[in-house]
Amino acid sequence: MTIKFLIEKEFKQLFRNPFLPRMILIFPCMIMLLMPWAASLEIKNINLNVVDNDHSILSRKLVDKIGASTYFRLNGVSQSYNEGLKEIERGTADIILEIPRDFEKDWITGNNPHVLVAANAVNGTKGGLGSAYLSAIVAGYSTELIEAQGSKSLAKPISVNKQALANVEVTTLNLFNPNLDYKLFMVPALMVMLLTLLCGFLPALNIVSEKEVGTIEQINVTPIGKFTFILAKLIPYWVVGFLVLTLCFALAWFLYGIFPAGSFLIIYLFAVLFVLGISGFGIVISNYSATMQQAMFVMWFFLLILILMSGLFTPIRSMPQWAQWITVLNPLKYLMQVMRAVYLRGSVLSELFPQLIALILFAVFFNSWAVKSYRKSK
């Protein structure tokens, strides 16, 4: 019965705060509304500068086709390649497309027409993907011209950067995400980030705030056990965390039409294990922190590393080998893998056994450490 009154006390303390309940409700809504649009690796609105030395019908059609794409924004036409480079140096252009003289003539006479693509690679992602998008559009334009001319034409494919494009037919099948919607990849991972903040960050700050106020000393002199005290501190935030997770499921379906291909029960099972582990980690930090400022700094330090190395933005397999070994110790990585696997592929429990074992080990380790490190005087 003791834990019942402690949990009641924690809920009263939570709802007496004029700011925290509103933040708990508004914060997930803002994350689900804004982050899927902002946290995207899709590259669009690339500033393109065109240097058309041919001024032919074919060159104008190529420029029009590129301008019709949602990926590029034609911001000007330069008279020479050097003039186009100056636009890149000013920051008004990301990519230069140079169409050489006799472009149409080479096409008609059966020679390989060439175009030059020069990209600003200061932003490697924009430069690399932008060049790939532009090369794909040129290749598609070349295919359209070949089909329009028919088999009797002497025309050859347009090559980019003086490398002829092979006439190989490619059929692409996008599994699990056929429309290549990046939001379908990001939204499940953002739910993991919200659980981390609500169930790991807030309980730690709650305990440290009681240390600063001095009310925790009143608990320490009672016969309440360490395990009971910590459990009473965590349960209200666990409840809040799962309510927010359910709210995120509804927002993902209502706003983006995203619904898991697998079972909700699997998600909740792994979420329970994750919340046990991350809240235990937060309690460990609070046990070693004397002030709110110290706890916030330490939590932010670990939180930043955990999020950046969880696979939220950068695929873990793209990281160096030593960084991939570090991610083995990151609990966020495992729940993100589970969320994306269940949402996108409809994975079942037997396919997620490694993540299950990892989250169980994290929960046991951090909660054991939290109970042992809590210093209670009787």
Image (cartoon, rainbow, N blue to C red):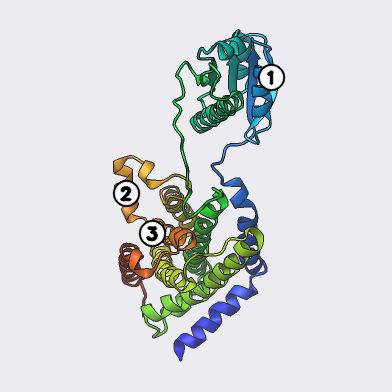
User: Mark 3 is on which residue type?
Assistant: Tyr
**Quadrant of the frame with the C terminus:** bottom left
Tell me the distance, in whole angstroms, between the alpha carbons under discs 2 and 3: 13 Å
Question: Image check: 337 left or right of 184?
Answer: left
Q: CA distance from mark 1 to mark 2?
A: 52 Å
Mark sitting earlier along the chain (1/2) = 1
- CA gap between label 3 and label 1 equals 51 Å
**Mark with earlier residue (3, 1):** 1
Q: Please name whichever residue, 277 or 321, is drawn nearer the observer in this view of the structure.
A: 321
Residue 335 image label? none
Residue at the disc numbered 1: 60
Q: Amino acid at mark 2?
A: Ile
Pointer 3 residue = 334
| Amino acid residing under circle 1 | Arg
Give the residue number, with chain letter if any, for mark 2: 326
Q: Is residue 324 above or below residue 131?
A: below
